Amino acid sequence: MELLYIVKALFNGSNSTSTTPQQSKGKIITGKPQDLSPHVFNDIIIIKQQLKQYDNQFYNKLFKLLEANHSKDLKALRRKYNRYTSTPHASTDIAQYQLELFRLYKSHLDDYINLLNFYKNNYHNSLYHSNKQLLSLAANMEIDDDEAPDHLLDPISFNLFQDPVVTPSGITYEKCHLVKHLRQKGNYDPLSRQPLFENELYPNLIIKEGVEHFKQSRSNARCEVAK
């Protein structure tokens, strides 16, 4: 069974431990699933290396959650076919296993690419909004160097939480942004990709209290400066 795969990432010989020949990004490769799977897996490794460059507590937690889910997927697939060598249809089972493994790797790669795009978009958006805010404050000679901790920022808008809610996956979002996502894009957690419905959301009172404490401490600091 011949399939095709388009290489997603460019190999970096100094960082990659793979012995697979290097391929150019975007090159179309054809072959059997067992021949293409190593190329997909190498792309996964490279994208994961790029993800690790974003040193952020929330990002790290999200990355580890995705890795754990993928590990479960692979273990489930291997359990499903762990006896294929002793069956009367061993060759058929092996071929089916290789095909499913290839498809699973592609699905995992898509997840990592989506996560990387999310990182990049939010990183650049946060830089833009931060710079815009700093320019505005500088014009009024009221520059504030305080920065909110990552866990007090909504992962969708990167603004301070106002009405934080937590999902069954343990991820906290600003309620209005998450509800908008659920109604417009579908019933799934935008980051963990797990099924999610509005009635499963619960207020995160600890985060809300943390936001209020942060606001109060910043207000007190301004009062001290004014004195």
Image: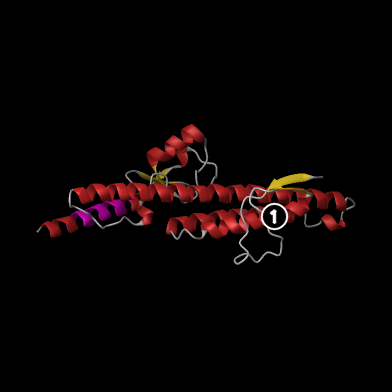
Residue 193 visible to the viewer: yes
Which residue bears the numbered disc 1? 39
Q: Quadrant of residue 225?
A: bottom left
User: In screen coordinates, is 72 left or right of 163?
Assistant: right
Q: Position of residue 28 (x, y in %)?
A: 70, 47
Q: Position of residue 224 (x, y in %)?
A: 14, 59
Q: For this rendering, which residue is in front, 124 or 96?
A: 124
Q: Which residue appears at 53% of the width and 57% of the height?
A: 50
Q: Position of residue 213 (x, y in %)?
A: 26, 55
Here the colouring is: secondary structure
Residue 204 visible to the viewer: no
Q: Residue furthest left?
A: 227
Q: For this rendering, which residue is in front, 70 or 4?
A: 4
Give the number of marks: 1
Residue extent of the magenta highlight: 208-220
Q: Position of residue 154 (x, y in %)?
A: 38, 47
Q: Indicate the quadrant containing the C terminus: top left, top right, bottom left or bottom right.
A: bottom left
Q: For this rendering, which residue is in front, 145 or 218?
A: 145
Residue 211 highlighted magenta (yes or no): yes
Residue type pointed to by label 1:
His
Q: Is residue 199 above or below residue 109?
A: above
Give the dominant element type of the magenta stretch: helix, strand or loop.
helix
Q: Indicate the quadrant containing the N terminus: top left, top right, bottom left or bottom right.
A: top right
User: Crowding near pointer 1: few (<14 within 10 Å), some, many (20+)?
Assistant: many
Residue 75 highlighted magenta (yes or no): no
Q: Secondary structure at mark 1?
A: helix
Q: For this rendering, which residue is in front, 158 or 142?
A: 142
